[in-house]
Amino acid sequence: MPAFKVTPLPFGRDNYIWIISNGRHAALVDPGEAAPALTALNGLELAAILLTHHHGDHTGGVGEIVAHYPGVPVYGPHKDNIPHVDHPVENGDRILIEPLELELQVIDVTAHTRGHVAYLGHGMLFCGDALFSAGCGRIFEGTASDLELALGRLARLNDETKVYCAHEYTLANLAFARAVEPENSARDRYASHCEALRRQGKPTLPSTIAIERAINPFLRIDVESVIDSVAAHCGTRPDNMLTCLATLRAWKDVFKG
Ligand code: ZN
Ligand code: FE
C-alpha cells in the first residue's frame, strides 16, 4: 500500500491545486495556474495531471505545465472536452498512474458542468467543484436531478474517505449551513475547528465523508430539521428529496451571510 503525501497549493482567491506525491513522483489535480504547480514539483517527476472539469480555474495552468513535461498524461472528463486531455475518462473507469502506484476510480458527478468527474482511490476523493465542505458547487450545466445523483454517489462513500475539494469555501458554506440548521452541535464543533485553522492561515481541507454527512446540508436533505427549514424558507413543504435539494441549492445561490 503506497503512502502518499497530499498537499494543497493555494492560488487565486480561494483555489487549491492538490499535489499527490510519493517523494519521487507526483500527480497534480486541477492545476488552474502553472506557477504554484511548477514550484511545488521542484525535482519531482510529474506522472499525471488529473482534471475534474473544464473551468479555467481548474485547467488554466495545463498548457504551460505540459510544455515543461512533454508527454505527461492528462486525464479529464470525456464530456467536458478540455484542451490537452489525452486520456478522456468517464464514470466507472479505473485509471492507474503507474509511477505513483496510484489507482483511481472515476465517478461521474455532473451538475456543476456537464462532464464533471471526481477521482476516488486509497481513501481519497478529489471532487473539484462538485462537493465542498459544508456545501456543493453551483449547478451551471446540469440539473437538480443530476446534482441529486452526484451527491448521492459521494454520500455513499466510506465514512473515512478524505474529501479534497478545489476551493476554500468552508467558512462561508458553514454560515449558510447554520441558517439552514441552527441546531446542529456537530456543525458548531466543526465550525470552531475550521475557524481556528483559518486564523492560523491553514486549509480546512481535507474533510471526510463522515463529517460532510453530519454537517453539510446538501447531504442532509432527508433530515427532518433541513426539510422543515426549506419548508419555512419557501412556504411549501418539499414533497420529495429532489425538490428539497433544488430549493436548498436555489436558496444558497442568493444567500448572503
Ligand atoms: Zn468550477
Ligand atoms: Fe472552481
Image: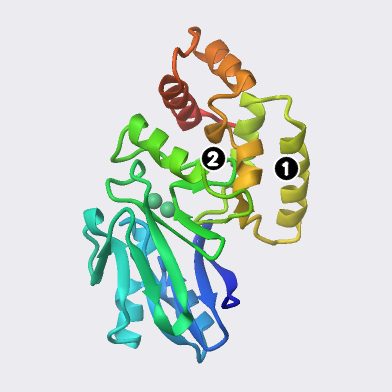
Q: Marks 2/1: CA distance? A: 13 Å
Identify the residue shown where x is 31% and y is 33%. Answer: 143
Q: Residue at x 78, y 52 (%)?
A: 196
Is disc 2 surrounded by few (<14), some (14 to 19) or many (20+) residues within 10 Å?
A: many
Residue 225 horizontal/vertical position (percent): 64, 19
Q: Earlier in the sequence, mark 2 or mark 1?
A: 2
User: Is 119 located above or below residue 187 in the figure?
Assistant: below
Amino acid residing under circle 1: Ala
Residue under the image location 61 percent in, 25 percent down: 180
Q: Which residue is mark 1?
A: 191
Left or right, 99 with reference to 227: left
Residue located 67% across and 30% down the image? 178
Q: Hey, which quadrant is residue 27 in on the image?
A: bottom left
Task: Decide if residue 9 is on the left or right side of residue 90.
Answer: right
Instruction: Please state which of residues 140 and 209 is positioned toward the viewer in this rendering.
Output: 209
Query: Can you say whether 157 is above or below 102 in the image?
Result: above
The residue tagged with tag 2: helix, strand or loop?
strand
In the figure, is residue 35 to the left or right of 4?
left
Quarter of the figure with residue 173: top right
Farthest bottom residue? 43
What label does residue 135 carry, if any? 2
Q: Who is closer to the viewer here, 59 or 126?
A: 126
Local SS, label 1 = helix
Counting from the top left corner in percent of width and height, residue 158 is at 58, 50
Q: Amino acid at mark 2?
A: Gly
Location of the C terminus (image quadrant): top right
Residue at the front extreme, as displayed = 1
Q: Please tell me the numbered disc located at residue 235.
A: none
